[in-house]
Amino acid sequence: MTEGREYLKDYTIRIANERQMAQHREVAGAYWNHELSPTEDFIKYYNREKYESEWGGDRVTIWQVASRPDTTLVRKDDIDGEGYAACRTYRRTGWAKRPGHDGLKDGFVYGISSVVTPPQHYRRGYATYMLSLLHLHLQPPSSIPSSLLPLKQDELVSDFKPGQADELPVALVNDSQNSGLKWAIKPTAPDFDEDKVEWIYRPDIESLSKELSTREKARLAEADVSKGAIWAEDPASTGALAFLPVKSTWYDPSCAPHPVGVRIKTGTPAEDPIVLFLTSFFPIGFEFLVTLISKLTPEYFPLALQAFDKAASDAGRERGFIWGLDPFSEIVEAWKNQPGREVEVKKRAEAKGGLMGTVYYGEEGQEGRMLDGQMWHWL
C-alpha cells in the first residue's frame, strides 16, 4: 500500500446508480462549464447521450468510487451513497493482430472519459485509484501491466488538469499519435472541380462505416507486428463514426446542413480517398477538424485540400486541425509542401488537445499499440 494512502483500501468502484449519475452530471458540468455550454446544457447533452444516442444505452457506463461494502447492512447502504470520483466508459468493438498468431482477434475497445472528482475531495487520490481498479473490471489481473495495478505509484493525483498527464498510471502514451497538424484555410479555388468529389453528410455515415470498417480491418491485417501487437477500433462499431458529427450539432445546430466528409472519385470506389471532418465542435476548438482519412495519397491530396477549403470557408473557418498522423509520413510532407498554408506540426496541447493514452490487455508480457490515433477515436 502506498504510504499515506492507506485509507483508499476502504473504497471500491461500482456502476453508478441514478443518484450517483446525477452527481457525476453536476460535477462534470461544472468542471467543463463554458459560456457556450453552461452546466444545464451539459446535463442535457449528458442525458441525451446516455439515453437517446445510438452509441448510448449499455455501451456507456458510469463508474463511481464508493465505500467498500462490508458484511453489515450499513456498509452496504454506503455503496449507494456519495461518490468520491467518477468516469464514463464507452465500449466499442475492434480487433487485434498479435505476433505468432494467424488472423485477427475480435475484441472490445473501452474508452474512458469525463473523469471527475467533487471539489471537496480533490488531491486525495480517488480518481487515480478508481482508474486503477477499473482495469480489474475490464480484464483479469494476469493480463494487466503491473504498473497499472492499484497503488503502485508514489504519487496519486485526482484532479485532472493540464500538466498532470504524465502522473497518471492508466495510460501508455504514444507520442507520435499525440501529434497535431494545423494549417491555413484559403478561399475556395476558382479551379476547384466539384464533379470530382462527392460530399458526405450525416445520414451517409452509417452506410459508409461498413466500407471504412473493411478498409481498417485490411490495414490492420497488413500491419507489422514484429515489435508487438497492434489493435484497432472498428469504424462500424455502433455509433463510432456518428459520435462526433451528431454531438457537433448538439453544441452548434448551425453546422447541421454542412457536409461531414468528402470522397475523392478515382473511378475505382474501393480506392477512393475518403476524409471525414467537422466544421464545428467547440470541446476541441473552432477550427475545421479532420477526423478521419482513408487512402488519401499525395496524388489526390491537392484536390482534397481544395475540398477542405470549400467546406471550411462555407462554415467561416480560417484554420484546419488534424490529429494522429505520423509527423514523418508522406501525407504530412505533402501538407508541408503546399505554399501559403502556414503548416504547424507538433505535440498537441493538454488543454483541449485530446491527448490519448492506451493500454493493451493481451498475453502476459506482450506490449500492444493502437493502429492510429485519428480524431474519430475521441470521446
Image (tube, rainbow, N blue to C red):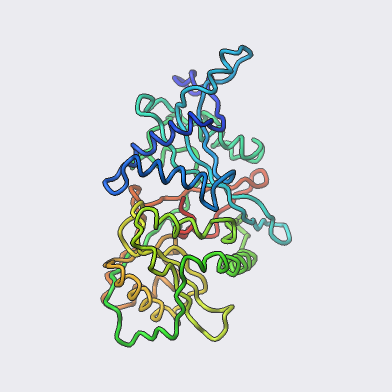
Say whether residue 115 is left or right of residue 185.
right
Residue 148 appears at what percent x and percent y? 54, 37
Say whether residue 20 is left or right of residue 224.
left
Write down the quadrant of residue 300 in the picture.
bottom left
In front of the other: 9 or 63: 63
In front of the other: 297 or 112: 112
Answer above or below: position of 89 versus 247.
above
* Residue displayed at 50% across by 66% down: 203
Say whether residue 164 is left or right of residue 372.
left
Write down the quadrant of residue 318 in the picture.
bottom left
Residue 228 appears at what percent x and percent y? 61, 55
Count of picture labels:
0
Residue 267 appears at what percent x and percent y? 54, 86
Write down the quadrant of residue 105 in the picture.
bottom right
Q: Is residue 163 visible?
A: no
In front of the other: 240 or 161: 240
Q: Is residue 258 visible?
A: yes
* Residue displayed at 64% across by 35% down: 141
Residue 295 appears at what percent x and percent y? 52, 74
Answer above or below: position of 371 versus 151.
below
The outermost residue toward the right is 102
* Residue displayed at 51% across by 60% down: 241
* Residue displayed at 46% across by 46% down: 48
Answer above or below: position of 255 versus 274.
above
